[in-house]
Image (tube, rainbow, N blue to C red):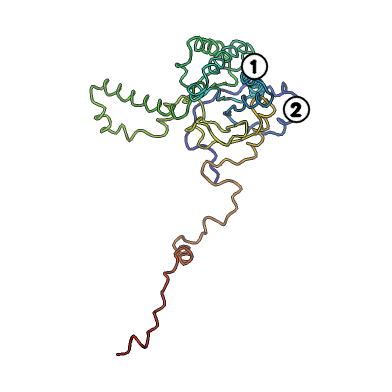
Amino acid sequence: MRASTPPSTPPSVPSRVPNRSHELAPEELSVYRTLDPAKIPQHVAIIMDGNGRWAGKRALKRFLGHQKGAESVQYVVETASRINLPWLTLYAFSLENNLRRPKSEVSFLMKLLKSYLVGNVKRMNDNNVRMAYIGRTHDLPQEVQDTMQWASESTAKNTGTTLTLALNYGARSEIVDAVRSILTDLTTEAHTRGCSVDDLLGAGALEALDESSIARALYTRHMPDPDLVIRTSGEQRISNFLLWQIAYSEIYVTDRLWPDFNGLHLLEAIAAYQRRERRFGGLGETFTDEDLDNLQPADEVAAEIKDHLIPKAETKPEPKSDPVLTRR
């Protein structure tokens, strides 16, 4: 039996809005017509990688690669909005980027983010896109935070694609923040009740902690888990991105560097996604093994194969007696 839904019920998603696929470019429309509109993923998350290498291959400075990458963001966002993709999350700036990149590059990225938001809010409104953010955004420069809030408020009434930028984000730190939030809530509840945290734990608070409790404390509690994760630049790693949320996500890796990635390539990734069968740990519809109801009992199978699994003890040949040594 196919497991058609994830183990946990995802949060509600934005209501469907009229499809604008007729606005796609001819190449995009050609790919879109091969898709099943009913199986468009609810949430696509993208690890945008390759800006520096794109610039290096052209003997350009890294900041030009970042500028070109920002253009790709808007192309992908507009295509997502035209096919009515509810959620799109982009890994824009990691916690590690903030800590390990040269200060000059980090400063440029912050200016680029601010410029992108200011320059694209009108296009987002035209495309019915609303802005959101995840990460330790409170550590970003105040002027950048102010621009982020302005862009979010300016697009808040839009009902189409929700574009979420992961900024100063790291999945491990997100989980740490979630645990801290749970402990803070527990301490607050204990204070309200006039008891100790130990009393609450003894009353079953610890047993009540489950996966859904942690999910509700994550940055992404308001959105469903990603159905599809796209990684550009060919790297075969997750890079500390949404580690909790992508437990059952399909992963699509392309060698294309992010500045060369556009809406057409997003549609190609979705086409590859639709050719896969998601099972969430269950058996798929195409499972063709023997009749599960008439399988041979496990103990009988074990008895039949035990000689193959357990090597027989080696028997050493008895030494031949020496007639000289045994002579009395």
* Foreground: disc 2 or disc 1: 2
The secondary element bearing badge 1 is classed as loop
Depth order, front residue of 219/47: 47
Q: What kind of residue is marked 1? A: Asn
Q: Specify whether 142 is left or right of 108.
A: left
Q: How many marks?
A: 2
**Residue at position x 33%, y 26% in the image:** 183
**Residue at position x 60%, y 53% in the image:** 288
Residue 255 lies in quadrant: top right
Q: Residue 147: give x, y in percent of width and height.
A: 53, 10
Residue 178 lies in quadrant: top left
Q: Which mark, by number, is residue 37?
A: none
Q: What kind of residue is marked 2? A: Glu
Up/down of 233 relative to 316, above or below:
above
Q: Specify whether 320 is left or right of 257.
A: left
Residue under label 1: 127
Q: Residue 136: give x, y in percent of width and height.
A: 45, 20
Q: Residue 125: give x, y in percent of width and height.
A: 62, 13
Depth order, front residue of 162/328: 328
Residue 192 lies in quadrant: top left
Depth order, front residue of 19/313: 313
- The local crowd at label 2, few if under 14, some if 14 to 19, many if 20 or more residues have their Cα within 10 Å, is few
Residue under label 2: 27
Mark 2 → mark 1, Cα distance in angstroms: 20 Å
- The local crowd at label 1, few if under 14, some if 14 to 19, many if 20 or more residues have their Cα within 10 Å, is many
